[in-house]
Amino acid sequence: QSVLTQPPSASGTPGQTVTISCSGSSSNIGSNTVNWYQQLPGTAPKLLIYNNNQRPSGVPDRFSGSKSGTSASLAISGLQSEDEADYYCAAWGGKRGVFGGGTKLTVL
Amino acid sequence: EVQLVESGGGLVEPGGSLRLSCAASGFTFSSYAMNWVRQAPGKGLEWVSSLSSSGSSIFYADSVKGRFTISRDNARNSLYLQMNSLRAEDTAVYYCASEVIADTAYDYWGQGTLVTVSS
């Protein structure tokens, strides 16, 4: 059971916009920033969004993040086949790092 | 180019010990906090431990507290994870990850090293 709650799966067709939610509590998301990671099959995770809505250099602006209260979300617009991956939200909370259980995104 | 290279994984019996290493290059290692994150086969990511740049602040997941010890050698640009009293549930790929871009954001990751705990 993960501390942060994500839907286990999401899907969309090329060009669509998909949103992945992440729910936490006052001790993690409610009091700290949220980061998002993308993990392609067989590879290490990659930082996608940090500090709720900032993109590291090289991450396309199709990826955006937001946070409100104890929840956060990742939006992927203009969905592409190469976006098919697992997505994880994460935050710091109570002297420990916490991750969501991950959302497997399928591009139909 | 930033590189993190883990080593030290392998097969160990329950109750055994293993020491993981992470060699860093391409950034000022001594200036940034470092972390270990693991992923059991077919499962999600689990944060294991964090260590501040100076080594003065250390945090552990409840699942490894008292059994794992994180440390660093800034002169050698290296991060370590000493794992004792290993259990089957510790079987996972262990990644080291840096916090260069922002606090608690794991921006650079190694390729991971597999630890298998089995008799």
Image: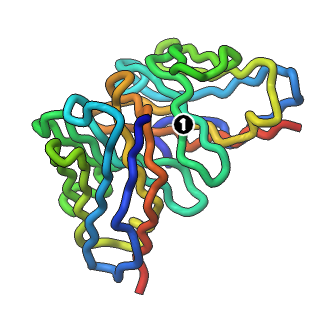
Residue for badge 1: A46
Residue shown at the point (33%, 41%) measured from the top left: B25
Colouring of the image: rainbow
Picture quadrant of residue A64: top right
Kind of element beneath mark 1: strand
Give the residue furthest to the left.
B56
- Residue A15 vs B65, above or below: the answer is above
What is the x, y in percent for residue B88? 41, 73
Q: Is residue A5 visible?
A: no
Task: Judge the density around disc 1: few (<14), some (14-19), many (≥20) Cα neighbours within 10 Å.
Answer: some
Picture quadrant of residue B108: top left
Picture quadrant of residue B81: bottom left
Quadrant for the C terminus of chain A, please: top right
- Residue B20 vs A31, above or below: the answer is below
Residue shown at the point (52%, 38%) measured from the top left: A100
Q: Is residue A75 visible?
A: yes
Residue A35 relative to residue B8: left or right: right
Residue B99 relative to residue B65: left or right: right
- Residue A86 vs B90, above or below: the answer is above
Q: Who is closer to the viewer here, A72 or B23?
A: B23
What is the x, y in percent for residue A92? 35, 30
Residue A101 relative to residue B49: left or right: right
Q: Who is closer to the viewer here, A31 or A54?
A: A54
Residue shown at the point (52%, 12%) measured from the top left: A68
Say what amino acid the circle numbered 1 marks. Lys
What is the x, y in percent for residue A59? 61, 22
Q: Chain of mark 1?
A: A
Residue shown at the point (41%, 20%) measured from the top left: A33
What is the x, y in percent for residue B57? 15, 36
